[in-house]
Image (spheres, rainbow, N blue to C red):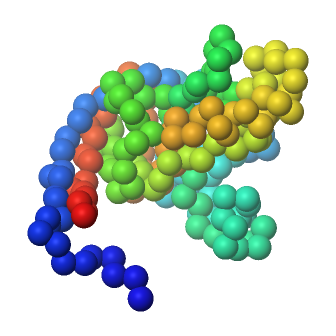
């Protein structure tokens, strides 16, 4: 049996909760039938995500990121919001190309925010980070096509490697309401523990 917490001289280190500040740089919504997004001035969020957005809904179908379920299994939709960065060696990657809904400035290493982080928007909305958004070939193909890469399939395959841990976050709505461009965000990173062997 694996002992996850063996006795050692070095106890578990607790990193206290901390608060950060950020701002909404841009907002995007995807038509209900398409992955790519377009810029908007505001987002209206309910408990099922962004009203009318491609990723909205209380549930979704499993895919390649959930190998523990057969493809197409209905499961909770924790992928309602995505925030993105890039590292592909092309001139530009626009958030719309990869289906981003929310672009935040003022939070370095945004993709590394841990699960459970709360984002409190000044207007009253609260979203809770579920996990990092794993990069996929669908987003990669969109980048390759929009950036004018000669090899679309090569770009689709390159993106998951280049964007690992830089693809942004997935989150769900804890408190619904309206988000506007330029809105201030108070970020609460939860207490975390580190085991040092």
When asked about the image quadrant of residue 35, the answer is: top right
Establish if 41 lies above or below 102.
above
Q: Give me the residue at 15% from left, 52% from top.
A: 16
* Residue 101 visible in this rendered orientation of the protein: no
Q: Which residue appears farthest toward the top when viewing the image?
A: 91
Residue 84 spot, x, y in % from top left: 54, 32
Q: Position of residue 11 (x, y in %)?
A: 14, 67
Q: Quadrant of the C terminus?
A: bottom left
Give above or below for 136 relative to 59: above
User: How many labels sit on residues?
Assistant: 0
Residue 14 sits in quarter: bottom left
Question: Vertically, is 165 above or below 180?
Answer: below
Q: What residue lies at 57% left-to-right and 52% top-to-bottom?
A: 79
Residue 83 vertical placement versus 11 (above, below): above
Q: Quadrant of the N terminus?
A: bottom left
Horizontal and vertical percent position of residue 69: 70, 73
Q: Is residue 98 visible?
A: yes
For the point 52% across and 35% down, the residue is: 166
Q: Position of residue 152 (x, y in %)?
A: 86, 27
The residue nearer to you, when weighing 158 against 102, is 158
175 left or right of 131 in image: left
Q: Quadrant of residue 138?
A: top right
Identity of the residue drawn at 66% across and 65% down: 66
Q: Is 21 in front, or is 44? A: 21
């Amino acid at each position: 049996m694996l002992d996850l917490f063996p006795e050692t001289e070095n106890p578990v280190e607790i990193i206290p909760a901390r608060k950060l500040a950020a701002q909404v740089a841009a907002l995007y919504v995807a038509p209900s039938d398409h992955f790519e997004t377009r810029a908007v001035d505001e987002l209206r969020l309910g408990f099922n995500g962004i009203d009318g957005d491609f990723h909205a809904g209380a549930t979704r179908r499993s895919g390649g990121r959930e190998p523990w379920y057969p493809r197409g299994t209905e499961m909770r939709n924790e992928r309602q919001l995505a925030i993105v960065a890039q590292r592909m060696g092309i001139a530009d990657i626009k958030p719309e190309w990869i289906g981003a809904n929310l672009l935040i400035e003022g939070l370095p290493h945004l993709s590394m925010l841990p699960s459970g982080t709360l984002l409190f928007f000044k207007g009253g909305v609260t979203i809770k980070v579920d996990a990092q958004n794993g990069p996929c070939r669908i987003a990669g193909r969109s980048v390759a096509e929009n950036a004018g890469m000669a090899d679309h399939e090569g770009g689709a395959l390159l993106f998951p490697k280049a964007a690992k841990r830089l693809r942004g976050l997935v989150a769900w709505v804890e408190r619904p309401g309206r988000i506007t461009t330029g809105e201030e965000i108070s970020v609460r990173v939860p207490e975390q523990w580190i085991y040092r062997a």
